[in-house]
Image (cartoon, rainbow, N blue to C red):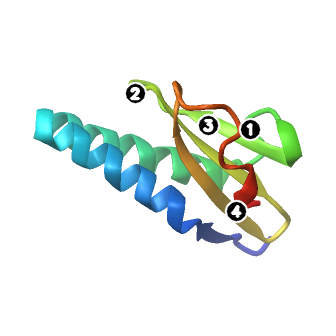
Amino acid sequence: MTPRQLYLHPAAVEEAEAAARWYRERSPRAAARFVDEVNQAIDKILGTPHRWPRGSHGTRKAKLPCFPFAVIYHASDDTIQILAVAHGSRQPGYWKNRL
């Protein structure tokens, strides 16, 4: 099996960076933990992309264990597209135009 390519939508990167900045203003330790959880979620997605149930438009959602965020992604045979690093309070599906 060939490895999948990872594509990070620029808006997803900005969401993760904005959240990390917000946490850093309050606690550098919390910010580092947030970044670690996002990276771990992406690593798990790359390793087992079909682990999470399929949602709307064929996307999947990997929730972070200690933060109110989820990594929204779409998996195909050769590509993983990270579409959003979405806060749980945000309007559901706001990222759908990124597909």
- Position in image of residue 86 (x %, y %): 53, 40
Instruction: Give the side of residue 93 with respect to residue 18, left or right.
Output: right
| Disc ID at residue 14 | none
Q: Earlier in the sequence, mark 1 or mark 4?
A: 1
Q: Quadrant of residue 79?
A: bottom right
Q: Which label sits on residue 62?
A: 3
Q: Residues within 10 Å of mark 2 (few under 14, many from 20)?
A: some
Q: Amino acid at mark 4?
A: Ile
The mark closer to the camera, 3 or 1, is 3
Q: Quadrant of the C terminus?
A: bottom right
Q: Earlier in the sequence, mark 2 or mark 3?
A: 3
- What residue lies at 62% left-to-right and 31% top-to-bottom? 91
* Residue 29 seen anywhere in this rendered image of the structure: yes
Spatial distance from mark 1 to mark 4, Cα to Cα? 13 Å
Residue that carries the numbered disc 4 in the rendered image: 80
Is residue 35 in view from this perspective? no
Which residue sits at x=64%, y=55%?
83
Q: Counting residues from the N terminus, which is met first, the one under dot 3 or under dot 1?
A: 1
Asked if the residue under mark 1 is in contact with the one under mark 3, i.e. CB atoms within 8 Å, the reply is: yes
Asked whether disc 1 touches disc 4, contact meaning CB atoms under 8 Å apart, the reply is: no
Residue identifier under label 2 = 67
> Which amino acid, by three-letter code, is at mark 2?
Phe
The amino acid type of the residue labelled 1 equals: Arg
Q: Position of residue 51 (x, y in %)?
A: 74, 38
Which quarter of the picture shows residue 52?
Answer: top right
Contact flag, marks 2 and 3 (Cβ < 8 Å): no
List the residue tagged with mark 1: 51
Answer whether labels 2 and 4 touch (C-beta < 8 Å). no
